[in-house]
Amino acid sequence: MISVRVQPEDFDVGAELAALEGQGGGAVASFTGIVRADDGVEAMTLEHYPGMTEKALTALANEAKVRWPLCGVTLLHRVGALRAGDRIVFVGTASDHRAAALEACAFLIDRLKTDAPFWKKEHRSNGDSWVEARATDDAAARSWEKGKAL
């Protein structure tokens, strides 16, 4: 099962994990991203291109299922206005074995940072700014081209 959602609403991490646990595997791995309040960030606005974003996330989930024996993948990303401390993204994988679940989860979060069409604007007391791509994110995504494993 692949579940891809892009939504403004918050999500229940426990419910997402329970859905993955229900896929019948022996291992579930997950990552939950939170809007950080570093450098004075008070809030963030995430924009996306409806349709294109879901297609890109689905392609990533399908790639993970080809590379690892997964019985479930969940990619959930919020859009719209978010405050510091809000949940922003959930990546979850289910497999018969922990290594596959952990590696696929790491792959998905690394690739999500570079391959998914989201635009982020940070809001600070001294002004707003668009978030630029980071070289560290590009390097993490490229590392999977050589079959990186945990």
Image (cartoon, rainbow, N blue to C red):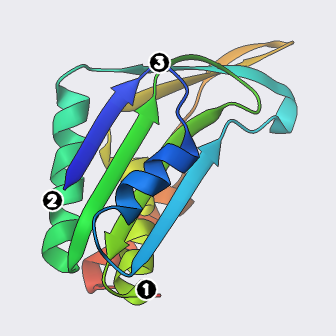
Question: Compared to 88, does 142 lie above or below?
Answer: below
Distance of mark 1 from mark 2, alpha carbons?
Answer: 19 Å
- In front of the other: 22 or 29: 22
SS type, badge 3: loop
Q: Decide: few, some or many residues near mark 1? Use Cα within 10 Å; few <14, some 14-19, many ≥20.
A: some
Q: Is residue 127 above or below residue 129?
A: above
Q: Nearer the viewer, mark 1 or mark 2?
A: 1
Helix, strand or loop at label 1? It is helix
- The residue to which callout 2 is attached is 62
Residue 10 point in image, percent of width and height: 55, 26
- The answer to which quarter of the image holds residue 24 is bottom left
Q: Amino acid at mark 3?
A: Pro
| Disc 2, SS | helix
Tell me which residue sits at (76%, 28%) in the image: 84
**Residue 70 or residue 120, whichever sits in front:** 70
Residue sitting at x 21%, y 52% = 2
Q: Is residue 87 left or right of residue 84?
A: left
Coordinates of residue 72 in the picture (x, y in percent): 27, 62
Is residue 92 found left or right of 36 in the rendered image? left
Q: Which residue is mark 3?
A: 8
In the rendered image, the vertical position of residue 98 relative to residue 112, given as above or below: below
Say which residue label 1 marks. Answer: 98
- Judge by depth and name the residue closer to the eye, 47 or 8: 8
Measured from the top left, where is residue 89 in percent x and y?
Answer: 51, 41
The image quarter containing residue 69 is bottom left
Position in image of residue 49 (x %, y %): 27, 20
- The alpha-carbon separation of the residues under discs 3 and 2 comes to 24 Å
**Cα–Cα gap, marks 1 and 3:** 31 Å
